[in-house]
Amino acid sequence: MSDGFTRRSVLCAAVVGGLLTACGTSAPKKVGGLGTARPGDRLAALADLPKGGGALVDTPGNGQVLLVRTADDQVRAFNPTCPHQGTTVEPPTAGVITCPTHKSTFDPATGEVRTGPSTKGLTEIPISVSGDAVVVA
């Protein structure tokens, strides 16, 4: 090799370039809320949400919504970002939504804070049930 390049320097540059490329291809972090979803967009099948439970649902535009099934045909939706420090909350278990970071808890039917450190509840997102689907309202 000429011009001051050695086989070793070319290989090192290739490895470093490959590592930087691999690091740059990670998926962007989901943002709480509807993203670019529009009224009428389908978020989930009602059958995919267990009664008393829920699911985190990805939306177009890198958004994410927490859907909670409170009754046979009733679903509530919340921005899953904990108001305390921005961690994504978990779907409800045993009748409570919990933030995994500092253990704030929220009412799955209303999104209201039950225990802190969060002092604010989850922000509700307008949705409706249309037939067997949950859609953006």
Image (cartoon, rainbow, N blue to C red):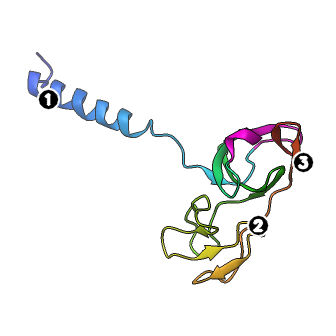
Q: Is residue 79 left or right of residue 37?
A: left
Q: Is residue 84 left or right of residue 17?
A: right
Q: Which type of secondary structure does the marked residue at label 1 adopt?
A: helix
> Residue flagged by tag 2: what amino acid is it?
Ala
| 45 in magenta | yes
Residues at circles 1 and 2 in contact by the CB criterion of under 8 Å: no
The residue labelled by disc 1 is 9
Please tell me which of labels 3 and 1 falls first in the chain: 1
The residues colored magenta run 36-49
Q: Which type of secondary structure does the marked residue at label 2 adopt?
A: loop
Residue 126 is situated, as x and y percent measured from the top left of the image, at 86, 55
> Residue flagged by tag 3: what amino acid is it?
Ala
The residue labelled by disc 3 is 137
Residues at circles 2 and 3 in contact by the CB criterion of under 8 Å: no
Q: CA distance from mark 2 to mark 3?
A: 18 Å
The reply to whether residue 73 is visible in this rendering is yes
